[in-house]
Amino acid sequence: MHETSSSETGKLAWITGASTGIGRAVAERLVRDGWRVAVSARSADMLEAFAAAHPGRVLAYPLDVTDREATLTVGDRIRAEHGPIDLALFSAGTYKRDSVRQFDSRDLATTINLNVLGTAQAMEAVIPAMVARRSGEIAVIASVAGLVGLPGGGFYGATKAALNNLCQSLAPELAREGVRLRIINPGFVETPLTAKNDFPMPFLISSEQAADAIVAGLKQDRFEIIFPWKMALAIKLLSLLPYGLFFRVTRRMLRKP
């Protein structure tokens, strides 16, 4: 992705998780930059309202990405109705704070099903066509929570770590096939998911600021897009600590019993 020009106006993006939060903010930003954007989420009414406000620019495709067949069908429909997908940004995800006192593996299964399998199914919907034409770009929303294990975020962080590992593994092979893959690791962003948090969120930014960082990152030649920089630096430094020091820091994040 490069700076917007007249030759790029009208390019097609597909964004999942596009009814709210980061997905919606990126969709709005791309529309302003001249893109056509196919938007998917489970909230059909919100997507239809979004599309009605931007006729011909926002294209609503309601979807639950945990349904593999539906996801593959939507990918086919978008291509058939609007042409090749130039950029696919997969933002659909869920989060629930976990605790050893209320440890329920079913919560982990739900989180994996959407965050990991849902994302993989969306990737499956675009990779074959992009490889066939040796063109296209995929961006996957993960999180800085996938870079280190933090109290209360074990289930969520495990899924985001899986996405980081998956994208690191696929990026070289996709590059050989002419397809670019990025991983996006935001810190705390104001979204309906983070609104559930009842603890201080350092370096919190708005969805619009996150969208600006993502679009700017897509214009650069790098695999990982990570922001805001203060949170990125803190997490990267934390990940380098020996476990003795690491756990001294993370124990301070524990909630009182």
Image (tube, rainbow, N blue to C red):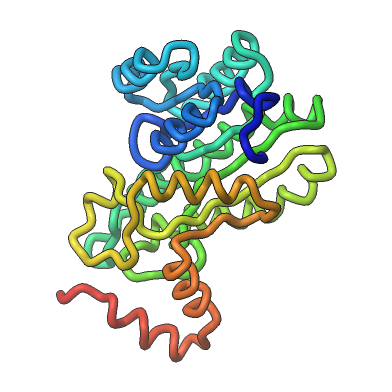
Q: Residue at x 65, y 30 (%)?
A: 5
Q: Quadrant of the N terminus?
A: top right
Q: At which x and y percent is residue 12?
A: 60, 23
* Residue 230 shown left or right of residue 176 in the figure: left
Residue lying furthest right in this view? 176
Q: At which x and y percent is residue 247?
A: 40, 84
Classify residue 89 by image quadrant. top right
Q: Is residue 98 above or below residue 11?
A: below
* Residue 113 shown left or right of residue 174 in the figure: left
Q: Is residue 17 above or below residue 56?
A: below
Residue lying furthest bottom in this view? 244
> Is residue 66 among what the camera can see?
no
Q: At which x and y percent is residue 157?
A: 43, 59
Q: Is residue 125 above or below residue 157?
A: above
> Is residue 234 among what the camera can see?
yes
Q: Residue at x 46, y 19 (%)?
A: 58
Q: Nearer the viewer, residue 2 or 187?
A: 2
Question: How many marks do you count on the picture?
Answer: 0
Q: Nearer the viewer, residue 93 or 82?
A: 82
* Residue 136 shown left or right of residue 34 in the figure: right
Q: Is residue 177 above or below residue 54?
A: below
Q: Quadrant of the C terminus?
A: bottom left
Classify residue 223 by image quadrant. bottom right
Residue lying furthest front in this view? 6
Q: Residue at x 40, y 37 (%)?
A: 25
Residue lying furthest top in this view? 81
Q: Residue at x 36, y 30 (%)?
A: 19
Q: At which x and y percent is residue 3?
A: 64, 39
